[in-house]
Each structure stands twice: as C-alpha cells, then as structure tokens.
Image (cartoon, rainbow, N blue to C red):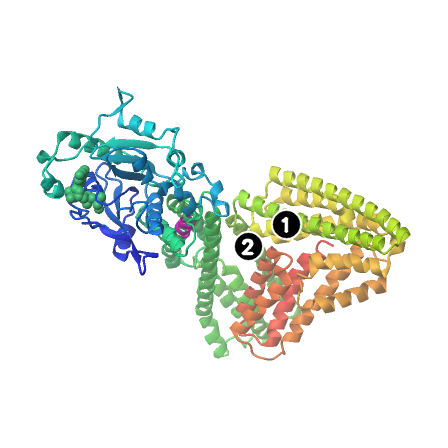
C-alpha cells in the first residue's frame, strides 16, 4: 500500500460501519502473515506522527495541524514489515476518542472495541502524565466487557472478566507524550514500565460515583497481562515547528525524543509472532474475514463474540483449503489418468492413492485451522466420490475400446457369413477357426482395461446362436461331434465366467481398500449412535414411569385406595425392572465400547454405520432377552473379520441371528405359547429393525404375506421364520419389477437408470449399504451392457440379478 487507506468507516447516521473495498482488496492480496499495531487516544496527541515513525517516515498518515480530527474511523497502512521480510506490518490509526463528557459514547466504544480486537499490539496514546485523569480517558476498557463476548452462549456478560479475554487480547503499550517529569517513584529513579505498574496499583482514597479508578486499574491489568510503557518528551520546543512536524528533519528533533521513540519502534517491531489466532498466523485474507465478522456483529446490534468470529474465520479458511485441495486432486487425476484410459484397476487405484496422498499433504499445508480434522474427513469423502467418477469413466473407456476391437476383428467373419461362406460341409470348423483367430486378436491387443473379459463374454453370448446355426447346417459333422463341440464351448464359457467372478471380487476388495478411513471418525460415529439410542431409551422409560405415577396419583385422588395400593406395588416392580435393565444396558454398552475401542474397525464407513445402527437397535431393547450375548457375538465376529464386504457382513449377521434364534425362542417365548400376538411382536420388532428399510414401498403387503405364511405354519423355529422372510421378500421383489414394466415396451436409458436407482434404494441401501452397491454394480453392468432393452428385457435382467445376488446373498446364503 503506497499510502494509508480507510478500512472501517461509519456510514449513514454513524450507527453502521462498512469495510472499505479498496483497503479490503489490498489486504486480500497479502498472503504473508501480518503484524498489526493499532493506536488509540484523544484527538491531536501525535498518534499519526508516531505511527509514521514505525515505517521510518515523516509522512503517511495525515497529521492534523488544526483542532479538527484528520482521521475518521479506522485507517490502515500495510507495508512489508521493516524488521522481517516474511511478514507484513499493518498500522491502524484511529479517529481520536472524545472525552468522557462530550461526544458519541457508543461510536467511541465501537471503534475502540474494533481496534482492540483487530490488532496484536494496542498502543494507547496520552499526554502529560499517567494520573487519574489519564486513566479516566481510558474508561472504554471497562466497557469492553459490555461490548465483547468471549464465548458464544455466555449470556451473563458481566461474568466474563478480562481473564476470559486475555488469550485473544493484544499486547498493551501506553505511550505518554510531552512527558516533562523525572521518571521516579517516591524519589527513586525507575523505568517507564515500573512507572506504569505503579500507576496501575490499587490506591486507597476517593472513588467517584461514575468513575472508579481502582476498578479501571484492575480491568486493565486483567485484560492486558502484557504491558509496556514509553514516555516521550516534547519533540521540539518551537511551537511553529511542532505544528509542522511532518516537515521537520530528525536533526531538528530533540535527541531524547528520538531515542525513546526509537526504543518504542524497536519494541513494537520486535513482536515476533505477529497477529495470531489459536496459535496460527493470520494473513491479509484471514484478517479481512475477522474484520468483516466483527463489523457485521456490531452493525446487527449484537455483542461481537470473539469465539464466534474466530470460529467463522476458521471455517471459511477450512472450506477454502478443502476446495483448493479438491481442485488439486481433480487436476492431478485428470492429467494422470484421462490420457491413458482405459487403465487397469490396480493402476487407477495406485494413481488415486498417489494423488490422494499428495492432496492430503497439500491440505495439511494450508488447512491450519482444522484442528479436529472435521474438514479433512469431508475432504477424504469428496476425494473418494471423485475417484468413483474416474472409476466409472475408466469402465466406460474400457467398454468402448473392447467393443471396437471385437467389432473390427469380427468384420472378416461377418463378410464371410454375408457371402454364405460357412454353409457347406466343414463350414463349422472353418467358422471356429476364424472365431479362434478373432479371440487371438482380442487377446493380443493390449490395455483393454477392466472390462476385457466381461466384454468378451458378452460378445460370445451374442454370437452363440450364430455358431449353433452354422453347426446345425454343417452336414460333415456327426451328432456326437456336435454335442462335443457344444460341451467344449460351454466349458470355455464357464471358465471365463469363473474368471470374471474372481475379478469382480478382486475389484470389490480393491475398492474396500481404497475406502480405508480414519479409525477415529468411525469410532465417534459408532459411539454417537450408541449414545443417541441409549438416551432415547432412557427418555422412554422415564416417560413410562411418569405416566404410571400420574395414574397412581389419580387413583389416590379419587379415593380408590385398594387400586392405588395395587397400582403402587406394580409400579415399584416396574421401576425396579427398569432400573435393572438400564444398569444392564449401561454395562453392556460400556463393555462394547471398550471392545470396539480395543479392536477398532479398520475400514469402510458403510459397515461401521450399519453396525452402529444395528447395535444401537439391539442396545435399545431389540431382542431384549438375547441382546447381550447377541451383541457380544456380533461385535466380536465383525470386528475380528474387518475389513468385510457387504456380503461378509450379511453372513456374519445371518450366522449370529441363526445361532441366537433358538436361544431367543427358548428364552423369551415358550414354544407352546407361540400365540399370534407373540409372533406378531417378534416379527414386528424384527421387521421394524431389519426389514422395513429393505422394502419400504412394499412394506405393508410384505407384512401381510409374512403373517399369512407364519400364522399358517405355527409353530416355527427361528430358522423357519428366517426362511419365510427370505422367501417372501424374494417374491415381493419380482412382484415389484413385474408391476412396473410392461414387457415389450422400449425404455430409455435414463428411465432404466432412474428405476434402478429407486429399486436399489428400496431394496439394498436400507439394510446393507454395501450389498446395495454390489447389487447396483451388477445390475447396471448387466442392463447397460444390453441397452437398449425392452421392459421385458429389464425385468429379465433385473430378476436374474436380484435372484442371483440380492436374495441369495442377503438371505438364502446364511439362513
Ligand atoms: N505537542 C506535541 N505535538 C505533536 C507531537 N507529535 C506530533 N505533534 C503535532 O501534533 C499535531 C497533531 O498530530 P497528529 O499526529 O495528527 O495527532 P493525532 O490527531 O493524534 O493523530 C500535529 O501538528 C503534529 O505536528 C508530540 O509528541 N507532541
Ligand atoms: Mg491522526
């Protein structure tokens, strides 16, 4: 900045402040840490002149040679720090404060507050000596408590003493101008700092009604634990020159003044840390963010809260760091992957890993305020989501490439078919030889990406009938030879399919590894879910007790003594039971918490979230009788086997529930007492916790079916129930599919996509996030590969995949 600029000015009737755009623009461009010195004091006491000296200049801030104040509002002058080239020095000159008696007190207060909040070195400038009068003019310090809050939510402002603030507050320097006395206390020479300390000690004696100097002394000491004092003589004796000091040469000025002024400059410039918030340096941009938050608070009539302003600034900074890091990741991935697509899964994964690590490094370098790592977690989530885009793009690229290789290689066969080439005897053999050549060309073409085998399989499938037709007309072949050829082809196809399945499994594993997340964040999630459920249970119990107690009171009021006594007896038993149950839960939860802490889940948020939900459900009373041992088993199995795929989790749940079910039945429900109500209760709980999420849309009819099946077949063991549920869901799934599509209808890609999204949302995501993703992948692969499909085609593909994966995986496999 060549010259000082107004930073904060009053507008309108002087009640609102604005930040000046030009100054803001200058500050925004400063990305080095800043030191900020603010000066405050009465009008025409040489403040501007002293500030200019900090830059070693005579002019800069305008000096007022008339009584009228030259400086309005708060001015700022930013230049490279004279003592440290890695920093900027921001000088803040304020409009002169008015005396206590005159002037707009609120306006003064607000300027004073802004100055204190926006600097790391606060200079108070006064003339003469430090006496009660000088102190009186610093009365605004007392009012700081009225004008600033330390922490949001502290409503009793009076309770916040200076001690709360002083971590945020600047160093305090008192400069006494035109000091004409000897520096001494009780006749003994002293330093200017001792002089200040002496003046700030409690004095016995008068204490005015409006002004209590002792209270002010205490305030200053509390607010500003770091204090210094400088006493400056009159710079020149000549009054005319005094008025035109900006034109005076140093040789005109008294050496005593120059010496002390130099000492002042040295101390102020040697502030090492500069302006810091929570131990972090503040650059021009962050400074503007803070200033804006404070000005906004003051304008809205609110008491500016330092905690909130700092928090706001930190969040803005974290968000910025997050966005920059995301940009960095995108750019890196764009450069490293797109030109070389299709890539193999492991190549893409390692490029992601590299870019991910690099990006986190970048983030850590710029996100200095993300102490709790919240934004880092967000960043990691976003990076994974973007990575997923690249995975999808890569798959598309691979598909395109494979398809075109196959089409090109096939053109030879196509033209031969066109020419009726394979129709004679031995035609099938020749066709096979040509097809084999096609396969070789395909195999020898490199870098086909992740869809190579899948595309080949599809292609083979597509040409199956063609081969069969050629074989059928080949008179040279015996039936036996034909059967053999058929079997051979089937075998090949099976082998390819097996390989494909294995690859998919590998890919899934790779994705799980890619998704590895920080333990801490997941632990917190699990814990939070526990806490929420436990609180809800407690509240429910308390409400129950309260209702029963009210009933007891009512009976008493109505004079029904016997009933009241009976009711009371029941109530006591109920309370005792509740208490015991709660204790038991609390104990379980504590143990569980410890178990998980000792064996923290290692990967995949979806799994952990699901566990947390299920465990939370269990903890809050689901399957009360077997809750404890079920939870233990569950946690042990899952934690021990992490990282698990969605499928793995399904298996674990299935196993545990299967084992627990008989125990559940014998513990809770006597088999002979399997009344409709009890089954309903059990199913109700089970379905509520486990199933309704799975099929939200068909929930009602599903329940009906379930009841029908189960009631018809009572008594069941737990396993039987599981089977029934699985079966019914399977029926419902195909029912949904068939209801939606009319076979034969041609469907757009978007429509199919939308349908699949909904279906998966309803079917998979509610219960097992991971199975959902797995299911989704297979479905989309199957359907997209065959596009455009008719409604009937979609039904077939969906039905097949759901049959194969969802139902199988979720239910049949483990029950
Ligand atoms: N008596 C006295 N006058 C000074 C001193 N420093 C500057 N001045 C003069 O006082 C007038 C006001 O100075 P200025 O720095 O604008 O005061 P401000 O209003 O507090 O910023 C100018 O004419 C200066 O030349 C000082 O230490 N003592
Ligand atoms: Mg001035």
Q: Earlier in the sequence, mark 1 or mark 2?
A: 2
> Which quadrant of the rendered structure holds the C terminus?
bottom right
Give the crowd class for mark 1: few <14, some 14-19, many >=20 residues within 10 Å. few
Closer-to-camera residue (466/475): 466
Asked whether 356 or 200 is in front, the reply is 200
Figure check: 411 above or below 672: below
> Looking at the rendering, which quadrant does residue 371 occupy?
top left
Disc ID at residue 532? 1
Q: Is residue 148 visible?
A: no
Q: CA distance from mark 1 to mark 2?
A: 41 Å
Inspect the magenta stretch and tell me whether residue 412 lies in it. Answer: no
Image coordinates for residue 261, horizontal then vertical, percent: 20, 33
**Most prominent secondary structure in the magenta stretch?**
helix
Numbered badge on residue 503: 2
Residue under the point 39% across and 58% down: 338
Instruction: Give coordinates of residue 84: x percent, y percent.
Output: 24, 37
User: Is 317 contained in the magenta span?
Assistant: yes
């Amino acid at each position: 900045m060549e010259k000082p600029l107004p930073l904060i000015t009053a507008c309108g009737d002087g009640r609102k402040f604005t930040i000046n755009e030009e100054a803001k623009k200058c500050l925004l461009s400063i990305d080095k840490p800043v030191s900020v010195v603010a000066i405050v004091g009465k009008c025409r006491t040489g403040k501007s002149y002293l500030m200019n000296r900090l830059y070693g200049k005579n002019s800069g801030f305008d000096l007022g040679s008339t009584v009228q104040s030259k400086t309005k509002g708060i001015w700022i002058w930013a230049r490279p720090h004279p003592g440290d080239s890695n920093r900027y020095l921001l000088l803040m000159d304020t409009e002169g404060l008015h005396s206590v008696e005159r002037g707009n007190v609120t306006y003064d207060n607000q300027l004073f507050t802004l100055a204190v909040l926006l600097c790391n070195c606060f200079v108070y400038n006064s003339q003469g000596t430090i006496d009660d009068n000088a102190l009186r003019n610093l009365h605004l310090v007392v009012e700081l408590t009225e004008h600033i809050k330390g922490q949001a939510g502290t409503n009793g402002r009076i309770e916040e003493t200076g001690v709360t603030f002083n971590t945020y507050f600047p160093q305090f320097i008192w400069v006494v101008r035109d000091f004409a006395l000897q520096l001494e206390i009780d006749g003994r020479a002293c330093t200017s700092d001792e002089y200040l300390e002496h003046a700030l000690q409690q004095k016995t004696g008068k204490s005015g009604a409006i002004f209590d100097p002792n209270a002010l002394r205490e305030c200053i000491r509390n607010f500003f634990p770091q204090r210094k004092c400088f006493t400056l003589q009159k710079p020149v004796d000549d009054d005319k020159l005094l008025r035109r000091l900006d034109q005076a040469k140093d040789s005109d000025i008294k050496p005593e003044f120059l010496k002390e002024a130099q000492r002042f400059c040295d101390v102020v410039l040697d502030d090492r840390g500069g302006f810091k918030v929570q131990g972090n340096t503040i650059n021009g941009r962050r400074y503007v963010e803070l200033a804006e938050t404070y000005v906004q608070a003051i304008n809205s009539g609110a008491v500016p809260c330092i905690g909130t302003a700092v928090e706001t600034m930190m969040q803005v900074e974290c968000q910025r760091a997050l966005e920059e890091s995301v940009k960095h990741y995108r750019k890196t991935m764009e450069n490293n992957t797109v030109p070389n697509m299709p890539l193999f899964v492991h190549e893409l994964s390692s490029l992601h890993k590299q870019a991910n690590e690099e990006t986190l490094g970048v983030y850590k370098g710029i996100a200095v305020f993300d102490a709790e790592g919240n934004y880092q977690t967000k960043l990691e989530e976003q990076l994974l989501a973007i990575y997923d885009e690249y995975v999808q793009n890569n798959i598309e690229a691979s598909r395109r490439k494979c398809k075109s290789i196959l089409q090109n290689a096939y053109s030879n066969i196509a033209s031969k078919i066109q020419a009726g080439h394979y129709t004679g005897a031995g035609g099938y053999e020749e066709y096979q030889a040509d097809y084999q050549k096609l396969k070789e060309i395909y195999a020898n073409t490199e870098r086909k990406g992740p869809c190579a085998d899948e595309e080949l399989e599809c292609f083979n499938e597509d040409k199956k009938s063609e081969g069969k037709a050629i074989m059928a007309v080949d008179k040279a072949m015996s039936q036996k030879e034909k059967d053999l050829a058929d079997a051979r082809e089937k075998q090949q196809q099976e082998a390819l399919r097996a390989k494909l399945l294995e690859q998919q499994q590998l890919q899934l594993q790779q994705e799980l590894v890619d998704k590895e997340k920080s333990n801490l964040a997941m632990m917190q999630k699990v814990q939070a879910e526990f806490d929420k459920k436990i609180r809800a249970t407690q509240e429910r119990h308390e409400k129950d007790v309260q209702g029963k107690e009210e009933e007891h009171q009512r009976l008493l009021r109505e004079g029904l003594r016997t009933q009241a006594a009976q009711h009371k007896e029941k109530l006591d038993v109920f309370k005792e039971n509740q208490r015991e149950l709660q204790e038991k839960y609390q104990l379980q939860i504590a143990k569980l918490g410890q178990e998980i802490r000792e064996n923290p889940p290692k990967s995949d948020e979806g799994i952990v979230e699901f566990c947390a939900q299920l465990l939370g459900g269990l903890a809050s009373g689901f399957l009360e009788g077997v809750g404890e041992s079920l939870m233990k088993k569950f946690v042990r199995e899952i934690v021990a086997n992490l990282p698990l795929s969605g499928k793995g989790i399904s298996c674990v749940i299935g196993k545990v529930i299967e084992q627990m079910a008989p125990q559940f039945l014998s513990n809770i429900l006597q088999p002979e007492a399997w009344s409709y109500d009890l089954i309903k209760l059990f199913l109700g709980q089970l379905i509520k916790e486990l199933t309704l999420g799975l099929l939200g849309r068909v929930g009602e009819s599903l329940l009906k079916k379930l009841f029908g099946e189960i009631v018809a077949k009572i008594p069941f063991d737990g396993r039987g129930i599981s089977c029934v549920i699985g079966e019914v869901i399977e029926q419902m799934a195909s029912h949904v599919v068939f209801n939606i599509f009319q076979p034969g209808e041609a469907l757009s890609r978007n429509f199919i996509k939308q349908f699949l999204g909904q279906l998966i949302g309803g079917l998979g995501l509610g219960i097992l996030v991971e199975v959902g993703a797995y299911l989704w992948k297979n479905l989309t692969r199957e359907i997209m590969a065959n596009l455009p499909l008719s409604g009937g085609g979609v039904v077939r593909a969906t039905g097949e995949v759901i049959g194969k994966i969802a139902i199988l995986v979720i239910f049949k496999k483990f029950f």
